[in-house]
Amino acid sequence: MAKTLTTEMRNEKTMHLDEMSTREILHVMNDEDKTVPDAVHNEINDIEQAATTVIDSFQKGGRLIYIGAGTSGRLGILDAVECPPTFGTDQDNVQGLIAGGDNAIMKAVEGAEDDPERAKADLKAHHLNENDTVVGLAASGRTPYVIGGLDYSQAIGASTVAVSCNKNAESSRHANESIEVDVGPEILTGSTRLKAGTAQKLVLNMISTSSMIRMGKVFENLMVDVQLTNQKLMKRAKTIISVAAQVDHHTASSYLEKACHNPKLAIVMIKRQCDYDEAKQTLDQAGGFVREAIALTNKEGE
């Protein structure tokens, strides 16, 4: 008899879930959710290795591509679409693919996750190459779409990471690296949009955010590459410049204009007291890292 996956097991604490009051349900959900960060913490070494792989891809001009089905696929898309506004990346740098295509984001496409060849076709359509890293997301670790995508990625030489919520997951055997976050049985048997979904979201947060930081997208703890796509983000950019360069809001606003709405350049211009062209040259020399750019300009000014 095949071993039951942890993600499919019944939770002994919720055998009478249907008899609980609303408050009791909420308490047991909250108690179970508290265990997720510890489960993620147990896999920090593997998460670090995955992030290092993604950073290597970015440094080679490659991309981070998430593939998944259902909740896992939607979580990959959620992480991907937040990278351009938060970190100023191109739309292509981080992508999320879901079994069944864009229609599956809003509505389940029955049977889509059972087709491994569909993942191969999707990755081909996105011109996957050896510089990319593909992260396969499957709470169960056995989704054919994800496994098919990992196999194709391996075949063409792309880096691969399998993320699951079962130990010794099948998908782990189809990837260079694996992250297996065992969060235990769900309160609602098999409903992996709960703890497993939370665990995957935390892992994706860690991979994308740490890799972006290591690519110079952050100064101190400020999102200096934020895209100014609305009034809220325009205001945030001015605050970032004000805090980072230790100037008043009016000065920050003035320099943001001079920097063509680029917060990084505005900060360097203020700290160096230089014009746009010099700030851009210095930032380019520093590889896009604001701290290093300031250090370079300060050294030159001594």
Image (spheres, rainbow, N blue to C red):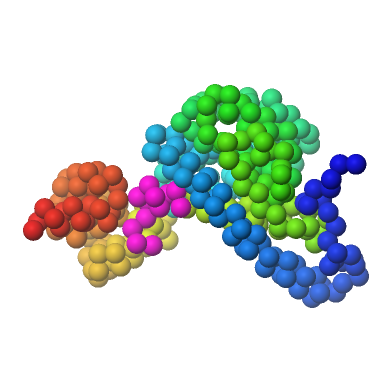
Residue 47, position in %: x, y? 55, 50
Residue 296, position in %: x, y? 18, 52
User: In the picture shown, does residue 7 fall above or below 127?
Assistant: below
Instruction: Check residue 218 for magenta coloring.
Output: yes
How many marks do you count on the picture? 0
Image quarter of the N terminus: top right
Residue 294, position in %: x, y? 21, 56
The reply to whether residue 259 is visible in this rendering is no
User: In the picture shown, does residue 267 fall above or below 94?
Assistant: below
Answer with the quarter of the image where residue 145 lies: top right
Residue 259, position in %: x, y? 24, 51
Image quarter of the C terminus: bottom left
Instruction: Check residue 49 for magenta coloring.
Output: no
Query: What residue range appears in magenta?
Result: 210-221
User: In the picture shown, does residue 174 fall above or below 204?
Assistant: above
Residue 81 located left or right of residue 32: left
Q: Residue at x 71, y 70 (%)?
A: 30
Q: Residue at x 15, y 51 (%)?
A: 275
- Which residue is nearer to you in this view: 57 or 235? 57
Q: Residue at x 9, y 56 (%)?
A: 301
Q: Residue at x 69, y 25 (%)?
A: 117
The reply to whether residue 184 is visible in this rendering is yes
